[in-house]
Image: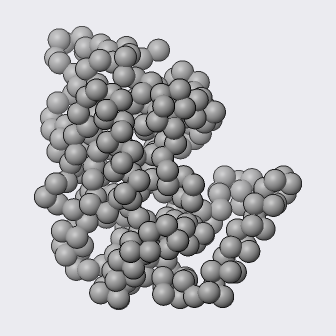
Amino acid sequence: MITSSHPADGRPVRHILSLSGGKDSTALAIYLRDRIPELEYVFCDTGKELPETYEYIDRLEVYLGKRVVRLNSDRDFDHYLQIYNNVLPDARTRWCTRKLKIEPFERFVGDDLCYNYIGIRADESQRKGYISTKPNIIARYPFIEDGITKEDVVRILEESGLGLPAYYEWRSRSGCYFCFFQQRIEWIGLLENHPDLYQKAMEYEAETGYAWSQRESLEELMQPDRIAAIIQEHERRKALKRNGRDRTLLQVFGFNELQIEDEGEACLICHL
């Protein structure tokens, strides 16, 4: 049970939930709205989010009846790309997460004692991991504590009237439109739903000399034969999953398809 309490020494404590624009952090905001009235909401804006994400955050703000603080108004992705000598972030460096998510949040908290509420569900409790290492920021996992699962999250969103973010029709997670953790079928979804953003992602590759994916450039990925092959493979995997035959040895030992392809787990603070 989550309680709004103060430490024994009488110091004030802040309760803060950082939103990604994804289903889990949004459902957690709804879940805690009346349980912790003083809860603060922040959104670390990279300047490169999907239009659907911005629209979803705006709708949530109306539902909460409380301001969602937008961070990074003066330091977006392009600012840090210059600092990092036009080297695009990848699954190993993740400078985008550190500079655009974690550090802005830590600056916002300052030296205050803070409970940071994180939307990891009870059915994925193994994901509990790094958000911030500052000792004054204490992670709390209400969904794990209260046994809230994915099915409950969907119910919470439906009952609120918000529903799922619109991008879930073609994308599996929140985050920048060019996130390097996207599956190739999601890049195709970006091409189909936001060709202008796909073009901008291609321009980053051309300007920096780096690619978002280690295996192929976006120009290569968008070729008709390649698109057809990606769609065919995606449908094959869906069929295997429906038939319960998609559990490879790697999956049995804890790695999912996205981890196998991209050699890492997507950043929690970006995608919850």
**x then y, percent, for residue 209:** 35, 88
Q: Splitting the image into 4 quarters, where does residue 158 fall? A: top right
Q: Residue at x 36, y 36 (%)?
A: 60
In which image quadrant can residue 243 be found? bottom right
| Residue 107 can be seen, yes or no | yes
Q: Is residue 97 above or below residue 129?
A: below
Residue 251, how many percent across, how many down? 71, 56
Q: Report the number of discs.
A: 0
Q: Residue at x 75, y 60 (%)?
A: 238
Q: Residue drawn 60% across and 69% down?
A: 185
**Residue 138: image location, x then y, percent:** 32, 31
- Could you say where residue 67 lies in the image, as x and y percent from the top left? 23, 33
Image quarter for residue 100?
bottom left
Left or right position of 118 against 16: right
Residue 227, above or below 5: below
Q: Is residue 227 above or below residue 2?
A: below
| Horizontal side of residue 247 vs 156, given as left or right | right
Residue 173 appears in view: no
Query: Residue at (18%, 73%) from the top-left corner?
Result: 83
Relative to 44, residue 32 above or below? above
Scheme of image coloration: one colour
